[in-house]
Image (cartoon, rainbow, N blue to C red):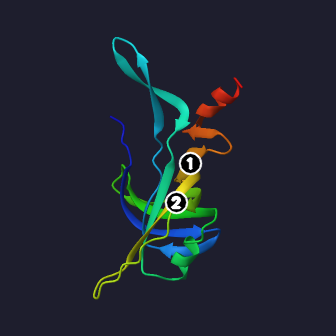
């Protein structure tokens, strides 16, 4: 059986908003890509995935503390967010190496975070973004690009929406 590199611990991350560093070593969740499903009749009902239609995308960033980075992300306008992170990869020869990942998101904050303060605790502030564009690279290879406004749905090099556009 061929060896598959093992991806493990995330080592560090950064977040940029329109090219300005706004966070380091934070928790974030990139969007899920969920195709819409319809229903067809085939020996009863059957769920059919509508390739090219996807549910709304959302990304979240959880930042410790209230600072200028948080205030920059709270701008109620379109933002180009860049996420960079490094994880460890175990190779077949027993060694390991760091591997860089990047995600690019275009979005607008869905709401401003509630700032919670408790003596002796950190203030965790989560911002959710409504996402219109999402591109993911792992080790320099594009994994996916979803651009709702440009009608691109590319996963592992296959643009699923181009088949739809060619019929219009």
Label 1 vs 2, first from the N-terminus: 2
* Residue found at x 65% / y 39%: 151
Nearer to the camera, 114 or 89: 114
Q: Secondary structure at mark 1?
A: strand
Q: Nearer the viewer, residue 8 or 136?
A: 136
The mark closer to the camera, 1 or 2, is 2
Horizontal and vertical percent for residue 39?
43, 23
Residue at 36% x, 37% y: name it: 2
Return the x and y of residue 20 as percentages of the image width and height: 62, 74
- Percent position (x, y) of residue 61? 46, 65
| Residue 11 against residue 40 in the figure, above or below | below
Which residue sits at x=33%, y=14%?
A: 44
Q: Which residue is mark 2?
A: 129
Q: Nearer the viewer, residue 105 or 99?
A: 105
Give 96 or 156, whichever is nearer the viewer: 156
| Crowding near the residue tagged with mark 1, few <14, some 14–19, many ≥20 C-alpha atoms within 10 Å | few
| Placement of 34 over or under 12, stated as above or below | above
Q: Residue furthest top?
A: 43
Label 2 element class: strand
The residue to which callout 1 is attached is 141
Residue 127, numbered circle: none
């Amino acid at each position: 059986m061929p060896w598959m590199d093992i991806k493990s611990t995330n080592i560090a991350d950064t977040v940029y908003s329109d090219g300005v560093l706004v966070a380091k070593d934070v928790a974030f969740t990139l969007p899920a890509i969920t195709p819409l499903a319809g229903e067809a009749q085939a020996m009863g009902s059957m769920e059919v995935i509508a390739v090219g239609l996807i549910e709304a995308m959302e990304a979240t960033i959880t930042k410790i503390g209230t600072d200028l980075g948080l205030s920059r992300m709270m701008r109620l306008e379109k933002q180009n967010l860049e996420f960079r992170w490094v994880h460890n990869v175990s190779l077949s020869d027993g060694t390991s190496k760091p591997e860089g990942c990047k995600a690019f998101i275009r979005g607008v904050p869905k709401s401003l975070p509630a700032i919670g303060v408790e003596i002796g605790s950190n203030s965790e502030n989560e911002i959710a973004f409504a996402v219109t564009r999402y591109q993911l690279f792992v080790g320099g290879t594009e994994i996916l690009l979803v651009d709702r406004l440009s009608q691109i749905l590319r996963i592992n090099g296959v643009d699923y929406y181009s088949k739809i556009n060619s019929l219009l």
